[in-house]
Every structure is written in structure tokens, then in C-alpha cells.
Image: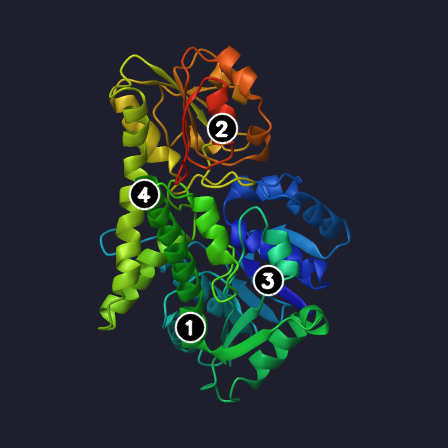
Amino acid sequence: MRIAMIGGGYVGLVSGACFAEFGTEVVIVEADQDKLAALRAGAIPIYEPGLDKIVSANVAAGRLSFTDALDSAIDTVDAVFIAVGTPTRRGDGHADLTYVYEATRQIARHARKGLLVVTKSTVPVGTGREVARILREERPDLSFSVASNPEFLREGNAIGDFMRPDRVIIGIDDTATDGGANARALMHQLYRPLYLIETPIVMTGLETAELTKYAANAFLAMKVTFINEMADLCEKVGGNIHDVARGMGLDQRIGRKFLHAGPGYGGSCFPKDTRALTAIARDAGSPSLLVEATVAINEARKAAMAERVIALCEGTVKGKTIAILGLTFKPDTDDMREASSLPLIQRLIEEGATIQAFDPEGMKPARPLLPESVIYANSAQEAATGADALVVLTEWNEFRAIAPSKLKAAMRGAVIADFRNIWDPTTLRAAGFTYRSIGRP
């Protein structure tokens, strides 16, 4: 089987490489010439553990290739996946589908035969129907099939999530002339390796598949927001959020995942998808008040983190040097989208602080997003040198291993705001630090 993946970004590149690992021939179509040149040269434009090895192995095996020529790319394929960006549209929270619909039109105009067109991007309910309409309008002479196959990839663990998923969601257009039989057969063939290991494959309608993606991400975002609120309550009543989360997570109806208190969620999915779902629900006349509250609470939380730092610094950071450990929204990625570091650093600089920051993978993408005055260190120890206070924003494993004595020797002050709870409060306080974490005594 041979497929084309439109878009060589995070979703397209990971999905394309993993499909190739399954034995499928994959051609990734990427219009950005710099990104295309990098991919052809063997350079991976994103940081994702293990992705470079899978890409290089499948390129060498002849199963994975890259091009900017959509017409030749789809000439001999059975299916085309649309994996382009769907950023938040300014003003109303909806997903911007400009790239999705343009890709659809280009597929229709260059197709020489009927193809299966699959939306891999996260798209609002009704997008699959519009894709089908555009295909019919552009090429009434061809018979296209349409499917929705949303991704559920966690940055930093995307390879494992694709190769060993909890489930695969496939939405089929059952109003097609063949009742969706062609789409169903091709998707079954494509995911045959997962069928063989008895991965749950959920076949459903287009609208259901599209909504499932948003519903899943919104629920996880609510889970994160809930545990953050419980952490705030723990701080008021003397509880320990680690024990609360463990006590909750052992309940199999709840589960342990996404119960880690912190400075608020970020990244490419949760913020964008929660906003889009509230817009979808509002337009449908069925507002999602829980999700709306989640969005508002999370934004307020990220904004409030700077106030915690300022309070720890006796009410002012003017003239003080603050060390920031971690810039990306989570470890094992270089993704800076909606990271909690962005509003926090901006506010501290506005209040007169000097920022010394270090992140193992995020400093290059952070530079255009942060004020020019930020000083980027070569290590966590260098960032801490001469600092009056230190803030942990991303729980990279290398930060956990730092000895408190080394921090004490490097820093000028003794204030630590550990917003990822990576260190033991007793140990840090015994080392002479004024230490504050999230939701712990």
C-alpha cells in the first residue's frame, strides 16, 4: 500500500514515519522549502525522541520519501492524509481550516483517479463533510472516499503512542455511494499491524470521530485543571497534593495519568482544542460550560505564577536575577506553544528582573518568543549562577539530579519556586533554601 501525507510538521512527520515502519510506502509532501531541504538532508526539524532513527531507517529502506510536488506524489497512492496546521482563528476560538481546505482542493485538482482522503489534523465537527463536498465540487468526474483519523500523540512519547496506541479512531463517511466500504477496507489494510496485536480499532461516523478527538483532549485538560485547583486547596488547608493525586489515581474509574499539579497546561493541543470545542459547542447551541471554565482557569493560573515568584522575593524582583530552569511546555520536546514560561518571564522582566534561562531543547524556539533581554545559559548550573531566585518550569530529568549543595554554592540568593514538584521540600529547606512547590507543605 502507498500513501501520501500532506504536511511534514509534527503530526505528518511522526505519522508518516510510523506508517512506513508498518511497511507502508509513504511520501510526505512539504511546501516549506527550508523544512523540505532539512528532511531530505536527514535533519529532523522537531525534537521527538526516537523519530530520527525511524525516519533514517525507512528512508534507507525506500519506504519514506519527501517532496514538494503534490501532483506526482498522489499519482500512484491509494490514500492521501491531510496533516496540515489548524491554528486557533483569531477572534472566535474556532480552528482555522484554511490549510485543510486548500490541501483538499489541491488533491482534487491533481488527482488522476478516485482516492481515499483522510483528515489526520485535528478538525472541528463537520470538516469531513465539507472535505467531501469540495472534492465533489472540484472533480465531479471522480469518486472520492473520505475518512477522519484523528491523532492522539503525546509530544515526547509520540512514537510509542503511534506504534502501541490505546485505541485508533476511524470515522467513515457512510453516506458515500459504496456506504464507506472502500474507506473501511483501505483503513483496515493500513492499520493491519495494529489489528494483529488486538489494538481496539473504533470505526464510527465522521462527526463522531471528529468530536471524539476534541472531547478526549478537553477531558484531560479538565483533569489537569482540577488537580491544580486541588493543589491550591492543599496549600490552604495543609494537605499534600501528591498524596491526594495518588489516592484519586488508584481509583480505576479515575486513573493516575494527568494528575500532576503544575503551572497550567500548554502545548499544541490542549489550549487550541479546548478553545475550538467551546466554539463548536456554542455555535451548536449547546455551550460546554465546564470546558469554558477550564480555559479561563488555566489562563489565569499561568498568569498568576509570576505573582508567586514575586511574593517569594519579598514583594519585588526589581534589580534581581531570576534563574529559569525549563522553557518548553513539557519535557522531551522543543515545543514552546502556550508554554507557561512565556507569560511568567514576560511579567518578571516587566517588573525589572534579569532572566537567566536554560532548557535542554527549547532555547532556540524560545528566542523569537521571549524578550531580547533574556540571557540563555549553557547549563542549569550556569543559569543558577548569581541568581537571587530560581524557578523550575519544566520537569526535565536532568534537573532532578542537581545536588542542592551545588545550587546553594552557585546562587546569590536562596529562593526556589519549584512549579513542577521535582525536588523534596525537606531536603531543599535543610540545604538553606526558602522553598515553595505546588500543593505541598
Tell me the residue that label 1 is attached to.
128
* Alpha carbons under labels 2 and 1: distance apart: 54 Å
In what quadrant of the picture does the C terminus appear? Answer: top left
- Of labels 3 and 1, earlier in sequence is 3
Callout 1: SS = helix
* Alpha carbons under labels 3 and 4: distance apart: 56 Å
Residue type marked 1: Gly
Name the residue at the front extreme: 238
Q: Left or right of 179: which side holds 387? A: left
- Of labels 4 and 2, earlier in sequence is 4
Tell me the residue that label 2 is attached to.
426
Above/below status of 436 relative to 242: above
Residue type marked 4: Val
Crowding at dot 4, Cα within 10 Å, few <14 / some 14-19 / many 20+, comes out as: few
Q: What percent of the width, then of the height, locates residue 131?
A: 41, 71
Callout 3: SS = strand
Crowding at dot 3, Cα within 10 Å, few <14 / some 14-19 / many 20+, comes out as: many
Report the front residue among 250 and 422: 250
Tell me the residue that label 4 is attached to.
237
Above/below status of 424 relative to 116: above
Q: Is residue 95 visible?
A: no
- Of labels 1 and 4, earlier in sequence is 1
Q: Which mark is residue 4?
A: 3
In what quadrant of the picture does the N terminus appear? Answer: bottom right
- Of labels 3 and 4, earlier in sequence is 3
